[in-house]
Every structure is written in structure tokens, then in C-alpha cells.
Image (cartoon, rainbow, N blue to C red):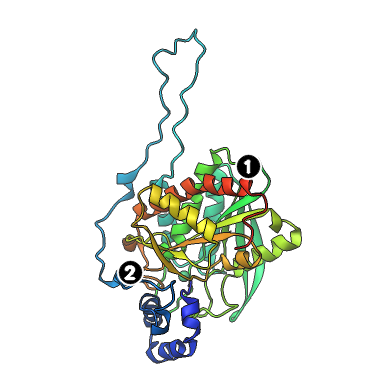
Amino acid sequence: MVRSVRRCESASDGANGARRATVGATVRTVAAIGVATILVAPSHALSDPRTLAPSNLLSHSRTLAPSDAPSHRRTLRTIAPLAPSDAPSQRRTLAPLAPLKFDSSRAWEHLRRQVAIGPRPAGSAPLAECRRYILSELKAAGIAAREQPFDAMTPIGTIKMANVIATIPGRRTDRIALATHYDSKLFREFRFVGASDGASSTAAVLELGRVLKARQNDYTIELLFLDGEEAVNTDWHDPDNTYGSRYYVRAARQAGTLAGLKALVLLDMIGDRNLDIRRDSNSTPWLTDLVWASAAKLGYGTGFVPANMAVEDDHLPFLAAAVPAVDIIDLDYPQWHTAEDDLDHVSARSLQMVGDVVLDALPQIEKQLAGTGTRGRGN
Ligand SMILES: [Zn+2]
């Protein structure tokens, strides 16, 4: 769960809590109320510039796009042929390789495999299976990875969790992290497979890793697969959430490696067929600007909309540690935390858009970090 519009809610937490208590006959109802809280901002928030414009509140009436099977979108990567004039005796110049592309059919397969595992809450055998899948895919891509196990103290007792940290060395040892959570939220009342909430971003980060492994990166790229983002309890109350990201930051600080982490790009819930990602006002503005500029350049303005909202997610522990961070998340997803967050409500096209945007923004992020030295730390 990633609760949004915290600042809007904070003034009315009591009222919202009462509404939840009154209406919350089922978890699904609670989740629906949560979405309604996002979309229909309380009146006191209407003067807040972060509040969504009324025109952005139409998600419930959206119709689903027709199926876009990933096989229709396979991106064939080709090597440009030699020019005809390249006779063997001449000094031969190879045409440059076509730039590596994010392949949403590969990402879709990663998503589908996770959903096929079933519910994957922290500490469960299915999540361990998912972790093995991530590790084996990283290994197949030639990317070094390690597990970072830890004990999380949760409201239902200690849960053994583990982040997966993969590294793609760059020219510099300083790092840019691409992160996702890979756990799915625990629901006992219904079967929750988290096609968008957990699987989509994990799939995208795996595919981004494959592409970036083949690229000469200026900065070292760290892929973070974080455990325990979801609250163990139904509701999102600190500190019952973001276990993996909080542990990562604490461990990196103790190990003296946190200062080498220069930026974090967090992906979460990017599978929605009707992708409309808002700017998160908790995120670092210059990072957000670069991501949205890439989206506009690529013609993805419908997927990356100019509206704002405030999101609580795995980026907050990094921001608190002065690591610039951006959360790319589509919380305008009616299936959020319901049994319907399944394959029918996500699309390869949405993964493609986010993958393209991240790959386009990454060189800009590298330039910004390299050109400004220590600037860029903090907000
Ligand atoms: Zn969630």
C-alpha cells in the first residue's frame, strides 16, 4: 500500500479513520475508500496546488483499452548492416549498433511469471520463489546480485525479509539506483496477486537491467528489489511499511556507502492499462522535471500527466537521508489493493512507456549529477 495525499489527509486523519471504521466492512471497501480519498480530495485541500484538478477525477468512468498483447509489441533489435561500400580491403567501419531498447514483451513475461507464483507477501514461500526468479534472471543477464537479508519487526511479529541488490558497474563508482518493491500486500480475505502493485515495476527493473548491462554507463547502476514495502496490517501506519528501503538506507549508512548513492528512481504500480502517472510532490523536483521532460519528448504526455499528488513510498527513507529520489507511480488505479489487480488490468504498453522514459531520462540524470558535483543532494 502506498497511501497518497498524506498532507491532505493529515488534517482529517480522524475523519478518514472514522470513515474507514464505519464503512470498512471489507478490506476491499477500505481500499476503495482509500482511492476515493485520493481522487475526491477533501474540501480543505482544494486550495492546495497539489490537489488534483476536477478533470483528473474521472478514472472511475474510464473504459479499458482493448487488449494489447505483448506479442504485438515485440521490439526487434537489429544490428545495422554494413554499408555496401565496405569492401573487405578497405578500412572497415561498423555502423553503430541500434540503441538498445526496452522490450516490453520481455518485461511482460517477468510480470506474468510473478503473477503466476500467486500472492507474494513478505516472509512467504512464494516471495522466496519470486526472489529466486529475480536472482536467476539477473544471473542470466550477467548482472552480479546479492541478497540482503534482515529481520523486520512487524505488528504480527518478526518476519525474515531480504532485499536483492544488483550492480552494473559504470565509469564511476558513484551509483544511481533503480528501485522497486517485489512483495505483494498480504490480504487474507481475497487472493491478491499484485499485477501492477509489485509485479509491474519489478518486471520493468529486470528489463531495464538487461538493457543497461549492455550500455556503457557513466554512473554505476544499482538495481534494488526491496522487500516489505507493504504494510502488514490493512492500513498504512508508520512504521508498518517500507521495511526493505528503511533497512537498505540504515545498512548503507553504517557501511559508509550511502554517500555514493547519488539518485534513486523508484518505480511502483506502473502496469495500469490507463496509465496516468502524476508528479509526486514528495519527490526531488529536478529529478521529477527530468523524468517528465523525457515523457513529453517521447510523446507520452497522456501517461505522465502534469498533475501533482503526494505519495508515501519506498523513496521516503532515501529522501530523509538526503538522496535525491523520484517515485514513478500510477495510484489512479481502481484495482489498487483489490482482487482485480490482475493481468486483465495491466498492459505491456504501459511498461513500455515507463521503460522508455527511464532510459531516456537516465543520461540526463547522469549529466545533471556529473555537471553539478555535489549539487543535487537533498531536495
Ligand atoms: Zn500496495
Helix, strand or loop under label 1: loop
Comparing 342 with 216, the one in front is 216
Q: Residue furthest top?
A: 89
CA neighbours of label 1 inside 10 A, class few (<14), some (14 to 19), many (20+): some
Left-right relation of 282 to 254 = left
The CA span between labels 2 and 1 is 40 Å
Residue 108 appears in the rendering: no
Helix, strand or loop under label 2: helix
Can you give x and y, in whole percent of width and height, for residue 21 in the image? 43, 90
Comparing 141 with 288, the one in front is 288
Callout count:
2
State which mark lies toward you, 2 or 1: 2
Q: According to the image, label 1 marks what residue?
A: 170
Can you give x and y, in whole percent of width and height, for residue 345 in the image? 33, 63
Amino acid at dot 2: Asn
Q: According to the image, label 2 marks what residue?
A: 56
